[in-house]
């Protein structure tokens, strides 16, 4: 008989094993990151036990005077980092931010144009995701597999034909900036709102890299705050739009799609915004440098890395066609056994039929960059992957090489360093 205390402690044990596994692993999932000690500390504060509904200084509950101060500052830091006119740090995830945007920008039955799933679009923009939940009439932009980007001419044609209420841009596989500027004439002709989903690339935008959607014509950016932006699992909406549109988007946040907004995570987000004001530019540059180096090195190892004719990538992400190495499923699982964590991914020619065993692997360099990996570590990762997947080296020896590579990188960079809370945080996280 296990006691209930043992049941509780069992969870704790498993969580510790999880930490151990990640401590010894090379994290290459393109949508993940680790938080700074100062941000992480915020998650453990009393803020995580409280409610705040509505906007700062107009709440429905008492006890929010400090929450209001934090939220005001989060908005101020966000507007300063992203040069936005408006910011809302309340969405509790990227999907939540998207639902709020859909709620704020559209009515049921409205038309929307979206990036296709097979071109890296996110499920929240799919008919079986949030877009479908609102009953929108959605059309996919045609994708150019060669360019690994939207097909500009075909997208212009689609926008002129459909006259959508909203044009959505931004993907989960995002190698090159979206050519928003080239589409703006057509978008203005049909008077559509421009919504950019920057979940993956928010940290690159924060650093002034990749692209600057608010200057290129976007009315709003929605995003997760934990992918290239190295904050808590949370969301944000940034605006450069009219007051009426912004008000309507904010009503989409509350009361549209959440009541409480996870105040501890919002505080962690505010801390991370401040850290990004300090370190965002150099961090973003290193992430992209590393992605380019890893792509080039994998190519030299004999892998088929997509986007070759355009230099493989301008973001944190690269995608590899591993059909010749046994496919996405088998390759990702073999790597996982060797402590290299990444995911299988649909490539543009895949269909939902082979979504369980797609052609590709997706790799992101944002997290390894954050713990200090540089060019030589990128080359070593490529070599390790080549030895395992192309030259079929013994998995046990590969695992030990991955562990050794990781063992020299235990500290989080591009953030404020050893705070008082660091020791405690080290126990639960590192
Ligand atoms: C990850 C992602 C989201 C959703 O973010 P969550 O924070 O996981 O809800 C939305 N859009 C895109 C393009 C994404 O990649």
Image (cartoon, helix red, strand yellow):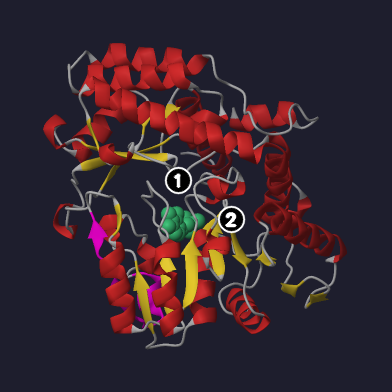
Residue found at x 48% / y 42%: 32
Residue 337 seen: no
Mark 1 surroundings: few (<14), some (14-19) or many (≥20) residues within 10 A: many
User: Ligand 1 quadrant?
Assistant: bottom left
Distance (Cα) linking label 2 and label 1 = 13 Å
- Which of the two discs, 2 and 1, labels the residue nearer the N terminus? 1
The quadrant where residue 338 appears:
top left
Q: Is mark 2 in CB contact (under 8 Å) with mark 1?
A: no
Element type at mark 1 = loop
- Image coordinates of residue 179 in percent, x first then y, are 40, 59
Residue found at x 40% / y 68%: 183
Q: Which residue is mark 2?
A: 234
Question: In the rendered structure, which segment of residues is drawn in magenta?
Answer: 129-144
Q: Note whether 258 is above or below 20 in the view shown.
A: below
Q: Would you say residue 140 sits in the magenta stretch?
A: yes
Element type at mark 2 = loop
Where is the C terminus found, in terms of image quarters?
Answer: top right
The quadrant where residue 151 appears:
bottom left
Q: Would you say residue 381 sits in the magenta stretch?
A: no
Residue found at x 39% / y 53%: 172
Q: Which residue is mark 1?
A: 31
Residue found at x 87% / y 65%: 65
């Amino acid at each position: 008989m296990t006691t209930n205390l043992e049941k509780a402690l069992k969870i704790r044990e498993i969580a510790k094993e999880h930490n151990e596994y990640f401590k010894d692993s090379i994290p290459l999932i393109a949508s993940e990151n680790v938080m700074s000690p100062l941000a992480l500390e915020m998650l453990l504060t009393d803020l995580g036990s409280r409610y705040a509904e509505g906007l700062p200084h107009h709440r429905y509950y008492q006890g929010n005077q400090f929450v209001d101060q934090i939220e005001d500052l989060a908005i101020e830091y966000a507007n300063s980092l992203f040069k936005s006119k408006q910011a809302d740090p309340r969405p509790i995830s990227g999907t939540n931010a998207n639902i709020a945007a859909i709620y704020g920008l559209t009515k049921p039955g409205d038309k929307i144009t979206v990036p296709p799933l097979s071109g890296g679009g996110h499920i929240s923009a799919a008919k079986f995701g949030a877009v479908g939940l609102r009953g929108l009439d959605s059309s996919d932009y045609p994708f150019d597999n060669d360019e690994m980007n939207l097909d500009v001419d075909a997208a212009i044609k689609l926008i002129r034909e459909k006259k959508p209420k909203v044009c959505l841009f931004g993907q989960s596989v995002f190698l090159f900036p979206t050519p928003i500027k080239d589409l703006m004439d057509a978008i203005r002709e049909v008077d559509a709102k421009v919504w950019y989903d920057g979940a993956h690339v928010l940290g690159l935008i924060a650093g002034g890299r990749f692209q600057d959607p608010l200057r290129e014509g976007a009315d709003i950016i929605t995003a997760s705050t934990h992918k290239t932006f190295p904050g808590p699992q949370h969301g944000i909406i940034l605006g450069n739009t009219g007051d009426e549109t912004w008000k309507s988007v904010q009503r989409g946040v509350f009361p549209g799609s959440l009541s409480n907004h996870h105040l501890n995570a919002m505080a962690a987000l505010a801390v991370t915004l401040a850290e990004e004001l300090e370190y965002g530019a150099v961090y973003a540059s290193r992430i992209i440098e590393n992605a380019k180096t890893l792509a080039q090195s994998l190519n030299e190892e004999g892998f088929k890395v997509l986007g070759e004719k355009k230099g493989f990538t301008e973001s944190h992400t690269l995608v590899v066609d591993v059909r010749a190495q046994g496919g996405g499923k088998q390759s990702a699982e073999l790597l996982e056994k060797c402590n290299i964590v990444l995911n299988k991914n649909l490539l543009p020619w895949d269909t939902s039929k082979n979504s369980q065993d797609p052609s590709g692997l997706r790799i992101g360099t944002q997290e390894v960059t954050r713990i200090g990996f540089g060019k030589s570590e990128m080359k070593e990762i490529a070599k390790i992957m080549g030895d395992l997947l192309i030259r079929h080296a013994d998995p046990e020896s590969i695992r030990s090489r991955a562990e050794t590579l990781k063992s020299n990188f235990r500290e989080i960079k591009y953030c404020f360093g050893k705070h008082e809370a660091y020791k405690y945080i080290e126990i639960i996280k590192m």
